[in-house]
Image (tube, rainbow, N blue to C red):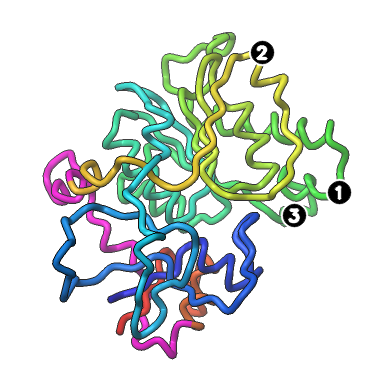
Amino acid sequence: MSVYGDVSDVSYYKKVANGQLCACAPLSLGYGSCGAVVAIGPQINGSGLETEPYFQGTLQEKINRPAVWCHKIVTHWLDRAAPTLGSGALVIGAVTVGLLLATVARQYACTLITIAGVDHGRVNYSIEKGLATQGDVVPDTSSPHGLMTPVFTYRGICISMKLDVAKSQASEFLTVSASDDVQEDDEEVGVDVTFEYTGKEACIQTALYTARPGGKVAMVAMGTSIQTLPLSATHLRELDNLCVFRTANTLKMRVRLLEGIGKPGDLPSLGSRFTHRVKGLGQAGRVLKGAGRTVDGEGRLVLKAVTEP
């Protein structure tokens, strides 16, 4: 079995918590894995499963998952957002799952997809691989001229100023994502669906200003537990704010998408996302440390780091 360090693993490794889920006993990591099934019990019928609650991950030599904590697969961000054919979408968070989200959104229905993140490498990767149609890189430090960028100035300011920063950043995203036929005074300006995958307050505030009237904002990540959000802005534009946790009824769709890899107009190869590999459980620490970075020590892009047996 190969184990890759996902966002949950990195969060537990660094903070001993994943959002509101805190580790209160020794915990084996490895919540993203794939491998070959070599033996099954006599009553196994082939159903897809979700393992909840968090118990022990797959970074161990032998795994015995209690049957009571195995559940048939439920809920998903694209099912919740339900974009229609020709929709425009914005993905905030050019992390690995954000890239996957953009990929599947294109297969679903979205024709214009903008991906936004703080790392040039990941945003450029999504454009080069055809995962998104546009990209926007948001600097998170002061500029070479000493000026403060929106994300940098967010820290330590009052809520009204924070919302002004969010509006400014949303305007930049919409400028990048706008199609050629959008007029400057168009009251319907905005994307049909915004997927927010950072969980950070500043990014969720921004997301709520990016959707068009009657549009949707899907909050996919588990982020900061308590946040201040501009709900009046969502009420005025009648936005649907969708909160997502885990996946639902998606096994058949996953299989169909994977079967289409390599065919014209279908899903591009996913293999290039596994950028780093190490051998043996003893190297798992290297994977977890590296998975939280955007580039390695040699300047190479980091997307997925894998521990192989």
User: Residue 240 vs residue 96: left or right?
Assistant: right
Q: Residue at x 51, y 55 (%)?
A: 120
Q: Within the magenta stretch, is there residue 103? A: no
Task: Tell me the quarter of the image containing the N terminus.
Answer: bottom left
Residues tagged 1 and 2 counted as in contact (Cβ below 8 A): no
Residue that badge 2 annotates: 236
Give the amino acid at mark 3: Ser
Counting residues from the start of the chain, the first of labels 3 and 1 encountered is 3
Q: CA distance from mark 3 to mark 1?
A: 15 Å
Residue that badge 1 annotates: 156
Counting residues from the start of the chain, the first of labels 1 and 2 encountered is 1
Residue 248, given in percent of the width and then of the height, sits at 36, 41
Task: Tell me the quarter of the image containing the C terminus.
Answer: bottom left
Residue 277 image-quadrant placement = bottom left
Q: Within the magenta stretch, is there residue 263? A: yes
Residue 144, given in percent of the width and then of the height, sits at 72, 57
**Of the pair 286 and 26, the residue shown nearer to us:** 26
The residue sitting at the left extreme is 263
Which mark, residue 23?
none
Counting residues from the start of the chain, the first of labels 2 and 3 encountered is 3
Give the amino acid at mark 1: Gly
Q: Residue at x 26, y 63 (%)?
A: 271
Residues tagged 2 and 3 counted as in contact (Cβ below 8 A): no
Residue 195 visible to an observer of this rendering: yes
Residue 104 image-quadrant placement = top left
Q: Residue at x 63, y 26 (%)?
A: 209
Q: Residue at x 48, y 34 (%)?
A: 90
Give the amino acid at mark 2: Leu
Which residues make up the magenta segment? 256-284
- In the image, which is nearer the foreground, mark 3 or mark 1? 1
Residue 301 visible to an observer of this rendering: no
